[in-house]
Amino acid sequence: MSTVNLENVCKTYQSGDSTVAALRNITLTLHEGEFAALCGPSGSGKSSLLNIIGCLDKPTIGSISILGNQVLPMGDDAISDIRSKSIGFIFQAFNLIPVLTVYENIEYPLLLNRSPAADRRNRVTEMIEALGLAGMANRRPAHLSGGQQQRVAVGRALITRPKLVLADEPTGNLDSATGLKIIELMRNLRDQHGSTLLFSTHDPALLIFPDRIYHLSDGCIVRQEEVNAHVASVTQSGRS
Amino acid sequence: MWRVLLNLAVRNIFRNRRRTILTFFAIASGMASIIVFGGFVSYTYFALREQTIHSQLGHLNVFKEGYSAHPGDASKYFINDPDKVEQIIATVPGVSTMTARLGFSALISTGEKTMNCLATGVVPGKEKELSNAEMILSGHRLAAGDTNGVVLGSLLAESLGVKVGDTVTMLTTTASGMINARDLQIAGIARVGSKEYDRVFVKLPLDVAQHLLNTKEVERVVVLLNQTGDTAKVSDTLKQKFAAAGMPLEIKTWHDLADFYQAVVRLYGGIFRVVNLIIAALFLFGIANTLTMSIFERVREIGTLRAIGTRRAGVRNMFLWEGFVMGLAGGVIGIFAGLITAFFINLFGGFYIPPPPGMSDGYQAFISVDPGTVAYAFVLTVAVATLSSLYPALRAAKLNIVQALGHT
């Protein structure tokens, strides 16, 4: 089963009297466990596409299904539940809740999903260890470096073991070395949890990690590139 | 989930401490104002009630049945056996004292000037506890031995141009309609609080009044109780006892007869409600403004909460919790502020209230903190604070996620 399936998706925005096309006729399928990247210059439609795949926005035309569920007919609460249970988000600006500690930021999605207290405690503690943030559990985001904040954001995105993790320019606010570590961390955690991972970037240095790269330009996928054999086997089994 | 939202709400409230402290201060001072003003109103009711009871009306007035239904024919509804009535009243627990009275209208004259007056025949020596409002300006109160004395209101005495020791003539009609007159000597001149009443006030011994009206009957028996709170209970007991004795009597409580007290209660009650409304409106806009500003500062954060799966209702409830917690905290601070303010006002002797319209004397007001008013003010504060957060909460819940995440 595909994790994400987009067919002929278009997205237009109204800007004054003119209509701006952010996405044009996008058809895309992401399979279970796939690690993919959206690549393209600013304004190419990466964020718009991630917003639609992440059920944060709706397409103007086209259809989208997440984990076999058609999203467009769903109500706001049902879409919120899909986001809390099945999708993890990582943002360029980290977007941690400033009044919550590291522990509480990572725990929040589990609270939304009403996980039992003991389970929450174990999973959050393990995640903090895996992120290399042991000893910082009680710190607030303002007292962390950018790299540490993004680690917390990765932990928050993966704590519910979502089927799909989306990251919008996750290294955009980090130096190159920290950025590479974050992508590597995301890939390792993806490997452990088997999530499908899609991130956007315009940094060519990060494109050594994904299995597949979608090149976007002016709202269109102009090229897709398979980087290693892993994706080929997944695609084959998904199609068979 | 509500615990998470409550936790977030509490932490968000203390994020901008200066603004939060100012908001708490506004809520607390509003609530303290309600408590202090409510305490002032409560004290005024209490003081006026006791003054009304102890200056004239007593707690209960016993009349012959039909008296109140025939105000123009009062003399036909006098009590003809007041001693027996008093004997029955004396058997009821809670009664402090009682006295018979005979009221009538008359003309009072010095020979040169004649004025209308409202005379009351009283039993000298039994009136002390029921004459608190009478301030003797010259002379003395009626005493047990005064067989021909009279006390006049100061404005009436001024109009007649008389002083203590002078003689006046009182002219009235007897119960059977004959004209009767008697010379009386002025024993005292008193101020009775109300200017209108002061212009017509005359008090004379009951037997003199009965002589003038040519009757052995009395108009009423006034009963004073130990506790005002026992009024209804004693009234019911007396009704049963009079009925059992076969005496056709009716009982009016002080509340039934205290028109001025009821007017003051209506007036102050209205003012209190208006003050509450103004304070509630200030709360409403103050808290709504604080939370709306808070939303502008937290747009991206709200977008994040929604993006990671918080429902619209979750965001809405978080802001409602913020309003509720602000009301709760501001309310608790307001209770202490109100109680401390009331304590210091009372400690420094209260404050002087000038005479109300138509009255000759002002009074020293204190703050009588009433638990009911405190509870009312607290509930009002919390409710209005929560209500104030409704609009910001709905606004936050409706934010577009993508636009919110892109907000800088």
Image (spheres, rainbow, N blue to C red):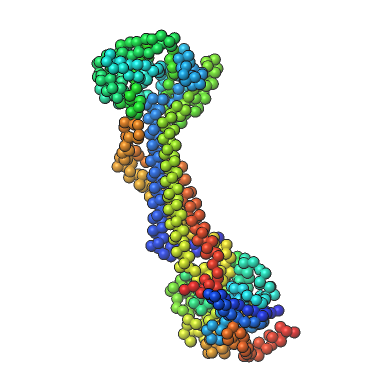
Whole-percent x and y of residue B34? 41, 46
Whole-percent x and y of residue A226? 63, 90
Who's the residue at 35% across and 31% down the image? Answer: B358
Within the image, what quadrant is residue A161 found in? bottom right
**Placement of A88 over or under B347, stated as above or below:** below
Within the image, what quadrant is residue A209 found in? bottom right
Who's the residue at 45% across and 50% down the image? Answer: B280
Look at the image and tell me whether residue A190 can be seen. no
Within the image, what quadrant is residue B225 found in? top left
Image quadrant in which the N terminus of chain A is located: bottom right
Who's the residue at 51% across and 19% down the image? Answer: B66
**Placement of A93 over or under B99, stated as above or below:** below
* The one of A27 and B111 positioned closer to us in this rendering: B111
Who's the residue at 29% across and 24% down the image? Answer: B154
Image quadrant in which the C terminus of chain A is located: bottom right
Q: Residue furthest front?
A: A17
**Placement of B117 over or under A29, stated as above or below:** above
Q: How many marks?
A: 0
**Placement of B312 over or under B179, stated as above or below:** below
Whole-percent x and y of residue B171? 35, 13
* The one of B60 and B102 positioned closer to us in this rendering: B102
Whole-percent x and y of residue A233? 69, 87
Look at the image and tell me whether residue B270 can be seen. yes
Q: Residue furthest right?
A: A240
